[in-house]
Amino acid sequence: MIRLEDAIKLLESYGIYGAKKGDSGTFEIPKKEFVLEKYEVLSEKRYLIPLPMKALYIQFLPCLFGFEPWCWVRKYKEPVIDFITNAIAVDDVHVYLLSGRITGKIITEFFNKSEEGETWEENVKTGEVRNREKVKGSADLSGNFFEEIILREIQEKLAEIRNVIKKTQPDAKIQIESEFEKKGYLEMIKSILDLLLTGRIYVDDKIKVRIAYSWLGEGRTIEREIKVEAYLPVENVYWHLW
């Protein structure tokens, strides 16, 4: 718990006077933009989850001239799976001065950079190709992540969050809101608040993400550990004297 007189003095240091217990208000902060300083994939693992194989009927007929129907075989090119994910903003921050508590939202962006797989028919005699097309849904990604946000300037952890990534098609970006809570003494609350009120915080963003997709009836998973250095814009910061 933080003493009322200390909390009032803290508000006065930010130019807010006359606040009483139970009051609330808004801090005025400058509007700033997201800046990415560094994005690094520290590790990656890929897993296959094969499904039971169906019996295949293979017809061994010679392809003599190339015009026989059995000269045409179906071929596939695997999808190219890639993605980017990182926090891009902090929003709706509430500072509860007497209880020494900060809550808010971290906004994480997931960008599916993948390319869908392809399929076509190819003549084993002539090499001719026909009916080439994308395999729809082959690069749709979904999954979950764990994220840790550390304030670089004071080496203090601001947030630990877990959330899910809904199915996302290639070339699409989605934004995921996650709630966080931080507790501490007056000095810690003040040091964090000082950074938030600049309108932008410089963070180490550590992410563990697990992504799943399927290809030709086979489940596939990618796990990545990612480290990001970035300036996150901060919007909508409120104070409460309780």
Image (cartoon, helix red, strand yellow):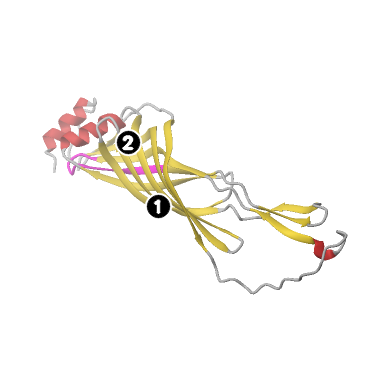
Near-viewer residue (58 or 167): 58
The part of the image, by quadrant, that contains residue 108 is top left
Q: Residue 155: x, y in percent?
A: 25, 34
The residue segment tinted magenta is: 96-107
Q: Residue 51: x, y in percent?
A: 55, 68
Q: Amino acid at mark 1?
A: Asn
Q: Main secondary structure of the magenta part?
A: strand
What residue is disc 2 on?
A: 237
Residue shown at the point (77%, 55%) measured from the top left: 122
Residue shown at the point (86%, 62%) measured from the top left: 64
Q: Amino acid at mark 2?
A: Val
Instruction: Give residue 122's mark.
Output: none
Q: Is residue 79 magenta?
A: no
Residue 37, can we see it?
Answer: yes
What residue is disc 1 on?
A: 163
Quadrant (top left, top right, bottom left, bottom right) of the N terminus = top left
Near-viewer residue (123 or 190): 123
Query: Compared to 190, does 159 lie above or below?
Result: below
- Per the image, label 2 sits on a secondary structure element best described as strand
Residue 111, can we see it?
Answer: no
